[in-house]
Image (cartoon, helix red, strand yellow):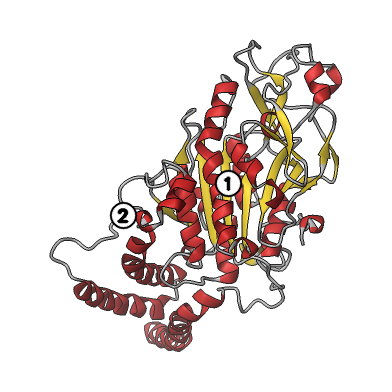
Amino acid sequence: MDLSINMQKARALTRRHFFGQAGMGFGAIALQQLLARNGYAAEEKGFRIPAKAKSIIYLHMAGSPSQIDLFEHKPALTKFHGKACPKEYLEGKRFAFIKGTPKMLGPVFDYKQHGQSGQWVSELLPGLTSIIDDVCMIRSMHTDQFNHSPAQLLLHTGNPLLGYPSMGSWVTYGLGSENSNLPAFVAMTSNGTAKQGQPLYDRLWGAGFLPGRFQGVKFRGQGDPILDLYNPAGVTREQRRRMLDALNKLNQDQASRFNDPAIATRIAQYELAFRMQMSVPELIDIKSEPKSVLDMYGPDATKSGRYAYNCLLARRLAERGVRFIQLYHRGWDAHGNAPKGVAAQCRDTDQSTAALLRDLKQRGMLDDTLVVWGGEFGRTIYCQGKLTKQNYGRDHHPNCFTYWLAGGGVKGGITYGETDDYSVNVTENPVHVHDLQATILHQLGINHERLTYRYQGRYFRLTDVHGKVVKDVLS
């Protein structure tokens, strides 16, 4: 008797499961292409606002450039160069390596004002100075983290802990893709000639608790940018299509039975990979660019994995509708040998960065492409290690550092925020990491407070419960 009742219950549950879950599973699959273009969060009302930018090109200088050596002209600090640091500038500060009372360390590179805006820039950045009137300089950035990994996580995922979606994943979740043949979110890495620096982990462009289809697609720096991009010898595109059709039929059957989001992700990724086999070879054909463009980006423009190559590829990606393009350039962690290291990093990046802005502008793309440049924190005005004329080091400094933005509805030729006479603390218009994130989303047409995802019983967002749009820098 008990066995018969249990069998009837099982059959009833199976029918309910079939009619309920099958509809949801097939519905999810049917909506896949529509949501990919319009944004997977399209059913969430109220997070869309008028957009000024279509794409983001985020140039992350991993290891953190020194604001003192590049952007902060501080004559008062120069006067105290080599003297013991006053105690009031050390109280309450946390350092990664400095111990005791360090010596004050002013800039050793020359500064001049450039452009009609008269912005101060170091001699190490001649390329940037040539387009400085297109740049909005934010001198009052600050963060809560003073070590690289948690600071990078906070900057790119909104949280210093592991497991949270990256900014590009949030953008993809909210807005979808403008090009169904390319990923909506692409990440690329390059190494500086100064040093290798800390490793860059996939979590910086990962989807966290969002479905896996929103994670960034990493383009490799050597060989084929995507593994298994080309069919094996003897396999035609028609054969590959038939294989995927058969595989999709099996996956759809499983999706209708279990309604597992991972299956929908797998279906979407297989289809995208198939389309990328046609689109990516044309995308990475850098040598098809005019010689004048290649010369503008520099001698490394055709060398896969170099910063110049990635900058040119970023423009080509934005040109084809990719929403979020993340470039990571390692080697800025100058704890020692800073004069040579910082100069080498600038030689690696300055020409190509300026070329990217100039290239976007001459194509009419800078108006709706937002370029973001900066590291995870700043550098101290105190010397780490022995101070000599030829050598010094700078420790981590989260209290103030410099970022710059260009294009995408941001005012060019302005400076926002200020630090004290020694670049120790922000004194005017502080901009937290969450404020920067809120501003980037705002320019893409996203209200950062309304784009949320429910996970483990609560609603999450990129900026958590923080963040204000920096409206004074917007046109």
Mark 2 lies on residue: 227
Judge by depth and name the residue closer to the eye, 173 or 374.
Answer: 374
Quadrant in the rendering for residue 235: bottom left
Which residue lies at the image location 38% right of the left edge and 47% below the top edge? 302
In the image, is residue 3 above or below residue 146? below
Give the residue type at disc 1.
Ala
Give the residue type at disc 2.
Leu
Which residue lies at the image location 68% right of the left edge and 46% below the top edge? 132
Q: Position of residue 328 (x, y in %)?
A: 52, 44
Query: Crowdedness of circle 1 by 10 Å Cα count: few (<14), some, many (20+)?
Result: many
In the image, is residue 5 above or below residue 239? below
Q: Residue furthest left?
A: 234
Query: Under tag 2, what secondary structure?
Result: loop
Instruction: Give the mark nearer the N terminus: 1 vs 2.
Output: 2
Mark 1 lies on residue: 354
Query: Crowdedness of circle 2 by 10 Å Cα count: few (<14), some, many (20+)?
Result: few
Left or right placement of residue 387 versus residue 19 in this view? right
